[in-house]
């Protein structure tokens, strides 16, 4: 892609209609280290990891055999079924009696609800991925130590061409609201540019500055509120 074209696409992702903010605060799974692509996919595309909620198990042969009625053992001196049949066999010219056969008993299939058998842990309810990127004070330059985290996001986006993400910048409460909105937006833009430079279409990204409006911990001044989040966008969010 030519530099001028890429710059135009980034400008669209930053200043165009893609800046419509997501409506609700997401539950975040924060990664301190570099996650795998599968870990990111499990949060951002949970349906790709969803197992079948119901399955049918048919009984094995030993279960079928166990379901059949057990013939009682013959008493001592009693005739065996074969001998009894031979002694009561009618003459060849007599019509053979029709014996009523009991229907074979088959154990019914067992229906298992997989979700009830294996309840999902609480962490699986997260819908956003977050990294605590240690930007320098009043800086939107991404430290190289965090490149590997963003590389995993780029890998996922290249593998999942239908996936679009909001890139949200978040700050602590130090400073004015206007200052933090601007700073968080500049940091989100820096991440968008990094992903575009690594092969992701800018039209699939949305830069959002959240400032100090959505702290993760009780103390809004706590530095742990500073982070960059990735939230999946629905198709109508990018129209």
Image (spheres, helix red, strand yellow):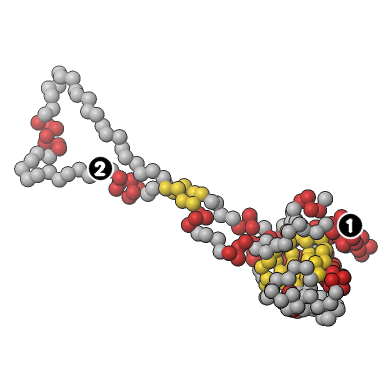
- Label 1 belongs to which residue? 16
Q: Is residue 26 among what the camera can see?
A: yes
Label 1: element kind:
loop
Left or right, 54 with reference to 177? left
* Tag nearer the camera, 2 or 1: 1
Q: Residue at x 63, y 55 (%)?
A: 47
Residue 90 position in % (x across, y down): 13, 24
Residue 130 position in % (x across, y down): 71, 69
Displayed quadrant of residue 23 = bottom right
Q: Is residue 133 among what the camera can see?
A: no
Left or right, 49 with reference to 210? left
Q: Which part of the image, by quadrant, shows the N terminus?
A: bottom right
Residue 34 position in % (x across, y down): 69, 73
Q: Residue at x 64, y 66 (%)?
A: 39
Pick out the residue farthest to the right: 4
Pick out the residue farthest to the left: 77
Query: How many other residues sit within 10 Å of disc 2, few (<14), some (14-19) or many (≥20)?
Result: few
Label 2: element kind:
loop
* Mark 2 and mark 1: Cα distance apart in space: 75 Å
Q: Nearer the viewer, residue 9 or 122?
A: 122
- Label 2 belongs to which residue? 69
Left or right, 207 with reference to 229? right
Q: Residue at x 80, y 59 (%)?
A: 21
Query: How many other residues sit within 10 Å of disc 1, few (<14), some (14-19) or many (≥20)?
Result: few
């Amino acid at each position: 892609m030519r530099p001028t074209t890429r710059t135009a696409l980034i400008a669209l992702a930053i200043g165009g209609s893609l800046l419509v903010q997501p409506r609700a605060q997401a539950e975040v799974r924060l990664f301190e280290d570099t996650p795998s692509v599968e870990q990111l996919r499990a949060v951002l595309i949970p349906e790709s990891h969803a197992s079948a909620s119901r399955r049918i198990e048919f009984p094995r042969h030993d279960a079928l055999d166990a379901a059949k009625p057990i013939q009682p053992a013959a008493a001592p001196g009693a005739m065996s079924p074969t001998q009894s049949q031979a002694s009561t066999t009618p003459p060849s010219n007599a019509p053979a009696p029709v014996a009523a056969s009991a229907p074979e008993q088959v154990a019914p299939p067992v229906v298992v609800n997989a979700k009830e058998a294996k309840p999902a842990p609480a962490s699986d309810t997260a819908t956003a991925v977050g990294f605590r990127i240690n930007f320098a004070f009043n800086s939107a330059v991404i430290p190289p130590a965090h490149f590997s985290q963003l590389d995993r996001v780029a890998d996922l986006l290249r593998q999942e061409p239908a996936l679009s993400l909001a890139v949200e910048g978040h700050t602590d409460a130090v400073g004015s609201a206007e200052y933090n909105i601007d700073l968080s937006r500049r940091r989100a833009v820096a991440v968008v540019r990094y992903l575009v430079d690594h092969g992701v279409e800018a039209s699939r990204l949305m830069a959002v500055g959240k400032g100090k409006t959505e702290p993760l911990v009780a103390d809004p001044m706590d530095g742990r509120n500073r982070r960059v989040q990735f939230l999946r966008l629905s198709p109508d969010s990018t129209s």
